[in-house]
Image (cartoon, coloured by chain):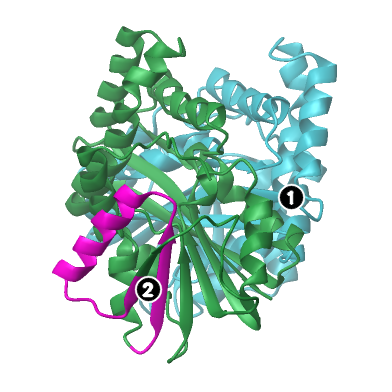
Chain colours: A cyan, B green
Amino acid sequence: MQSDYVHGYSERESVRLADQANCLSDLLHHDSIFPENSLVLEAGCGVGAQTKIVAPKNPKSKFISIDISEESLQEAKSLIQSLKIRNVEFQSGDIFKMNFADEYFDHILVCFVLEHLSKPLDALQSLKRVLKKGGTITLIEGDHGSAYFYPDSSYARRAIDCQVQLQKLNGGNALIGRELYPILVNASFSQCSVSPRMVYVDSSRPELVEGFTRNTFTAMIEGVKEKAIDNSLMSESDFNKGVKDLYRTSESDGVFCYTFFKGVGYK
Amino acid sequence: MQSDYVHGYSERESVRLADQANCLSDLLHHDSIFPENSLVLEAGCGVGAQTKIVAPKNPKSKFISIDISEESLQEAKSLIQSLKIRNVEFQSGDIFKMNFADEYFDHILVCFVLEHLSKPLDALQSLKRVLKKGGTITLIEGDHGSAYFYPDSSYARRAIDCQVQLQKLNGGNALIGRELYPILVNASFSQCSVSPRMVYVDSSRPELVEGFTRNTFTAMIEGVKEKAIDNSLMSESDFNKGVKDLYRTSESDGVFCYTFFKGVGYK
């Protein structure tokens, strides 16, 4: 796993990830329901932004949530404790070197993790080892190539592409959402199915304008400004114009579209 | 209205429009239901590709379907006759110069028309005149900027952009889907709402691979090859590579995404 995420671990980032999860939780997780008494591995739980949504939805199942970053795990632990959620156990762990016995888990959940990995297929194969036969793996990822908006802006598109390029430089893939189906099939999961979860935002949906267009997506792009300039991907003034144009899409006549993908496969 | 559509009126094009409607009819029209006994204006019916889906869904309403092209109207008439659909009356007509009395229609439907117009707002204002107070206008449009796929290909993206540029040269807008909300609001319709209709295609959905990725979208891009080359937008070999790469997305590990937008407003 990459230890130096493009998204970083800054405090602002933690707030952003929590914002994102709150406003998108229904879209992504309305169907994140496991059979009662399941033992579920959440692989790459980060700061617990998805854990806090999915664990309470499955009160009769137990979650083991692992992450490679001790700092994120600590944050996730205090978040889950503060919410009085009691069916999650946190463990330090690397997806590629897990100590769990073969076929240990009933189900596996992997949210916003594959995008950071240079070898997502290897990750799925490693995860498959610890999954019971007949168990499911659920993948959720975004795809930055799915972002488009009104008014259109080449500066905004280039600023988004900076994030895609930085993710690539870091060994990741910000366009992985569209690839979930072939990845699941290549990892030899069966009955694979992918459902897109499109976020459509116009001013009739003010919570999404704030919660998604401004505080999730544009804030994330704004967050890579320094790295984009350091890597000579865009000039500071062009990047600023791109971010300004992204915020422009949150005005009363603006529209913003983005799609997440949720894939499920059976072992 | 533009009389020289980028999509053209060739026989192949008629087949393509029919293919598109068949495979997308549920996605686009499952909710194209008007109250019984409505008088509905279908503005810009073309060859009847949408008429043949929507009219039978509303057997107790009457449709007046107009188009500026006599050739398309003739084709639409024989299609609807051959299907024994009896609640449609065809009339030659220009959206910008209609002879109907003010507030003549209960509801209005406009599918894949605004993309061809240089002044879509004027079209809506003209249509609004013949709509009763409390009546609805329904708009359906695609957005070529919503197309993305796996494997990604810059040639394919450029070939799609040729279609966008040609539509623009012709006074139209192939990215109009994302604009439906502001257009409806600017035309002073009320209670405006837009719902995206995303087509997600992978090899677990073979009908869509054939019916959408290959026979609808890629065929449409392939259809503008000559004009793209004539207008020096792309070299023939690059364009061919783009089309080949689009067909590549229909293989077993390929994925194709496209989004239509359906907007409704009240007078």
B13 drawn magenta: no
Q: Which image quarter: residue A201?
A: bottom right
Question: Residue B96, how many percent across, how many down?
Answer: 60, 55
Mark 1: secondary structure: loop
Question: Residue B70, how many percent across, how many down?
Answer: 34, 51
Question: Residue B123, how many percent across, how many down?
Answer: 62, 55
First to last magenta residue range:
B60-89
Q: Which residue does the numbered mark 1 point to in the structure image?
A: A254
Q: Is residue A103 visible?
A: no
Question: Residue A165, how many percent across, how many down?
Answer: 58, 21
The front one of B62 and A111 is B62
* Neighbour tally class for label 1: few under 14, some 14-19, many 20 plus, Cα within 10 Å: many
Q: Are both tags, 1 and 2, on one chain?
A: no
**Residue A40 sits above or below residue B211 on the image:** below
**Quick one: quadrant of the C terminus of chain A?**
bottom left
**Residue B228 sits above or below residue B34 on the image:** above
Q: Are marks 1 and 2 in contact (CB under 8 Å)?
A: no
Q: Which residue is rendered at x = 49% and y = 53% of the image?
A: B141
The amino acid type found where label 1 is placed reads: Gly
Q: Which residue is rendered at x = 48% and y = 39% of the image?
A: B144
Q: Which residue does the numbered mark 2 point to in the structure image?
A: B30
The front one of A20 and A84 is A20
**Residue B179 sits above or below residue A122 on the image:** below
The amino acid type found where label 2 is placed reads: His
Q: Left or right: A58 with respect to A189?
A: right
Q: Left or right: B68 with respect to B224?
A: right
Mark 2: secondary structure: loop
Q: Which image quarter: residue B266?
A: bottom right
Q: Is residue B125 visible?
A: yes
B74 drawn magenta: yes
Kindly identify which chain the residue marked by label 1 belongs to.
A
